[in-house]
Amino acid sequence: KVPGHYIRKQTLKNQERYITPPLKEHEDKVLRAEERSIALEKELFNALRDRVARECTRLQATAEVLAEIDVYVALALLAVSRRYCRPVLCDEPVLDIREGRHPVLDKLQPTGQFVPNDIRLGCGGDPAAGAESGGSGRLQIITGPNMAGKSTYIRQAALLVVMAQLGSFVPATSARIGLADRIFARVGASDELGKGQSTFMVEMTETARILNAATPKSLVILDEIGRGTSTYDGVSLAWAVTEYLHDALGSRTMFATHYHELTALAARLPRLQNATVKVKEWQGEVVFLHEVGPGAADRSYGIQVAKLAGLPPAVIARAQDVLSTLEAEDRATPKGFDDLPLFAATPRAQPMPEADPAATAVKTALEALSPDDLSPREALEALYRLKGTLARRD
């Protein structure tokens, strides 16, 4: 007998199903629980959002202060752990950094592999002394082999100026840095296919922006200007850019280049100094010292770097042969570049060779012939006679 408060819900073949009012009520709660949960979550979120919105200004101000504190604490911890120094900022356009280090590479090489270097621009001295003045010039031409560290050296200078002007200590033993209104960088090589610009066009566009916007208080770093075109065009452009930076802009400039011809400008431009990254040749191998000092490099050691990169020995050997042949040729570049064109295009006069009797005889015979008056047979016979003359010479 079924209790009276049971309500028939379903009749099957061999059974019947019943439900009670409490079970029905519980079923309704379970079925509506998810919907009510979503509605309640939305209600709570909206309430929290409204409370946050009322305190938005205070929260943003607090976040800004905490972010600033976080940056300064991080810089302070880095300065203590890596032995940074407090830079001296001044209004004079100088850059005097002693034993400076690249902040990123110095962190990646904690056991002292990174070699520190001095950076000195516009630090006084005798301008006429050129590269030996110890930093009198505002413009520095840096030459040296591939992989020696030229690009690292100039990027290090820009990073240290940025760090000093944002309030950080810098990785050096001492630093005196003139405030820079802007820092311009023309480094790297890439094209912009979407804009239809080649690597050289991108390079020239960036250089144009620098030359049109830099001031005497700016810091400019340049890496391999003119490398994307022919040698003569590239050297000419690099030469003209260097003169413009020196004469018209007067910006503190560090120019890393493989155009060793630019080092001759130190004799003509009083505020230009030469610097080079040192290497040592040992038992046919090249050892990169990563030390920057005064002077100019005379080689780029490109073949040695290619060998380190893993080029096949046959390619390296052939490159050495071609290089030896080119260096043996006497194709000297003029020492002074005061007169255009930059390089002499007219070849040097060569001594006249001694007259060849057989060649003279052939020339005389050719001049005596009248092709219009010769029959085909006569022309063929004349050709055989000339060939016979040359054969007797051999």
Image (spheres, rainbow, N blue to C red):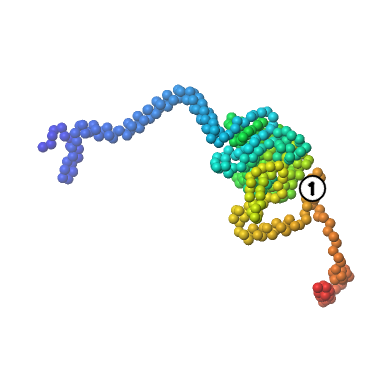
How crowded is the residue under tag 1: few (<14 C-alpha within 10 Å), some, or many (20+)? few
In depth, the one of 325 and 2 nearer the eye is: 325
Residue at 59% x, 36% y is 171
- Count the marks: how many? 1
Q: Is residue 200 above or below residue 351?
A: above
The image shows residue 164 at horizontal and vertical percentages of: 61, 32
- Is residue 169 toward the left or the right of residue 297 in the image? left
- Is residue 77 toward the left or the right of residue 153 in the image? left
Most extreme residue toward the front, as rendered? 283
- Mark yes or no: residue 203 visible: no
- Examine the image and state in which quarter residue 316 appears: bottom right
Residue under label 1: 335
In depth, the one of 289 and 239 nearer the eye is: 289
Residue at 62% x, 40% y is 116
The image shows residue 242 at horizontal and vertical percentages of: 73, 41
- Mark yes or no: residue 299 visible: yes
- Examine the image and state in which quarter residue 381 appears: bottom right
Residue at 68% x, 28% y is 91
In depth, the one of 33 and 135 nearer the eye is: 135
